Image (tube, grey):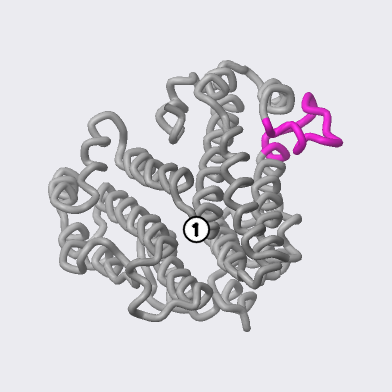
């Protein structure tokens, strides 16, 4: 297949699909509904999500089914792009598989942490099983860290999960797990992109991944500061990073902050100071997501690198799906639209 044709296809197709994304009016309409079937019917009849409902009666769709259809749609879109990439020897798709596997492992660990692992089987993405490096059905039976490590035997993730549990993180091992997995992904990304050490700092994909990693670090540390009785030494364990726009000293200073106000003050002196401005009208997590979203939205418009456009397209599409799921959750529990609106990212 012609390389230039495939690259142009990825650039044009990603931007064309993103051009059909939900508008502020679409979001307002969705927030006005009082049942999940009503919202599903709207997505079928008024948006570009219509094809995902083929074979389904929207009036009979429940929340779990709708979430599954949305996630499968995202995966299907990505695999279409991957087919063009693979045809020209581009193996960037492997990173997406790794990233999806990590998402599944974090979901499993979240269920384990809350003692509700039996619920995982109901969210298991059957459509993804043939691509994953994980045995998802085997993982659905684990209940302890030891069983999880055993189920990951001979997978790329075994060493990282062993490291997470060997450190015996108290309080909450999910935040440390997110950061450890990020470090794993950063190393794998460099391998997949076939970058030499002196090439990483200028690579646009690495820059975007670094942004995501920094946001995860900042959110994790900020949350831990708000938890009562969490020792500083626990938070300081999280400061190591393969790639970051924050110096090690700055990361340590942020992790050493005694209050969220002190954390914000330190952050205001960094490249991420704009997040501090956004916290005037939103909580920290939403402010960080807004900052991250704006950078990804800019890249999909102006980048000429097909890998960058594909990466940003998947981020932005996943963000839209998360917005829809937030709305569906609020509809399900009969919460007012003012409750969900602050959770929605990039709708203005």
Q: Nearer the viewer, residue 148 or 103?
A: 103
Q: Does the image show residue 161?
A: no
Where residue 70 sits in the image (x, y, percent)? 67, 41
- The residue depicted at 51 percent of the width and 42 percent of the height is 319
* Label 1: which secondary element: loop
Depth check: 119 or 88 in front?
88
Give yes or no for residue 52 being in the magenta stretch.
yes
* Numbered circles on residues, count: 1
- Farthest right residue? 55
Residue 273, image x and y in percent?
A: 20, 46
Q: Nearer the viewer, residue 62 or 319?
A: 319
Q: Tell me, yes or no, whether the highlighted magenta stretch contains residue 176.
A: no
Asked whether, in this view, residue 169 is left or right of residue 1, the answer is left
Q: Residue at x 48, y 54 (%)?
A: 304
Q: If the image is split into quadrants, where does the C terminus sit?
A: top left
Q: Position of residue 69 (x, y in %)?
A: 71, 42
- Residue annotated with mark 1: 305
From this view, report whether residue 293 is shown above or below residue 7.
Answer: above
Q: Which residue range is magenta in the image?
A: 48-66
Which image quadrant is residue 127 in?
Answer: bottom right
Question: In this rendering, does residue 60 appear at all?
Answer: yes
Q: Quadrant of residue 281?
A: top left
Q: 10 Å neighbourhood of mark 1: few (<14), some, or many (≥20)?
A: some
Quarter containing the N terminus: bottom right
**Is residue 45 placed above or below 116 in the rendered structure?**
above
The residue lying at 65 percent from left, 72 percent from top is 89
In this rendering, the answer to whether 82 lies above or below 163 is above
Q: Residue at x 54, y 24 (%)?
A: 27
Image coordinates for residue 62, horizontal then vertical, percent: 72, 33
């Amino acid at each position: 297949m012609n390389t230039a044709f495939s690259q142009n296809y990825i650039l044009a197709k990603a931007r064309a699909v993103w051009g059909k994304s939900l508008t502020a009016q679409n979001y307002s309409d969705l927030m006005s509904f009082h049942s999940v079937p009503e919202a599903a019917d709207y997505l079928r009849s008024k948006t570009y999500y219509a094809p995902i409902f083929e074979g389904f009666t929207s009036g009979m769709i429940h929340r779990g089914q709708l979430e599954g259809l949305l996630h499968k749609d995202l995966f299907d879109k990505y695999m279409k792009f991957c087919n063009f990439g693979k045809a020209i020897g581009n193996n960037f798709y492997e990173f997406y598989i790794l990233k999806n596997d990590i998402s599944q492992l974090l979901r499993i660990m979240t269920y384990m942490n809350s003692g509700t692992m039996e619920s995982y089987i109901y969210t298991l993405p059957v459509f993804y099983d043939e691509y994953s490096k994980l045995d998802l059905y085997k993982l659905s039976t684990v209940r302890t860290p030891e069983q999880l490590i055993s189920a990951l035997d001979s997978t790329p993730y075994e060493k990282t999960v062993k490291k997470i549990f060997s450190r015996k993180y108290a309080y909450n091992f999910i935040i440390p797990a997110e950061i450890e997995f990020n470090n794993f992904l950063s190393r794998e990304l460099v391998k997949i992109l076939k970058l030499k050490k002196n090439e990483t700092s200028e690579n646009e994909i690495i820059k975007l991944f670094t942004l995501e990693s920094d946001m995860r670090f900042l959110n994790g540390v900020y949350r831990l500061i708000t938890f009562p009785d969490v020792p500083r030494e626990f938070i300081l364990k999280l400061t190591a990073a393969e790639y970051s726009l924050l110096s090690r000293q700055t990361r340590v200073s942020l992790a050493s902050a005694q209050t969220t106000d002190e954390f914000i003050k330190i952050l205001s002196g960094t490249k991420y100071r704009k997040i501090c401005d956004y916290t005037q009208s939103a909580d920290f997590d939403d402010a960080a997501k807004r900052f991250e979203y704006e950078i990804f939205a800019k890249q999909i418009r102006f980048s000429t690198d097909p890998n960058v456009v594909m990466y940003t397209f998947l981020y932005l599409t996943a963000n839209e799906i998360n917005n829809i799921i937030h709305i569906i959750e609020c509809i399900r529990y009969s919460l007012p639209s003012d409750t969900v609106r602050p959770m929605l990212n990039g709708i203005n």
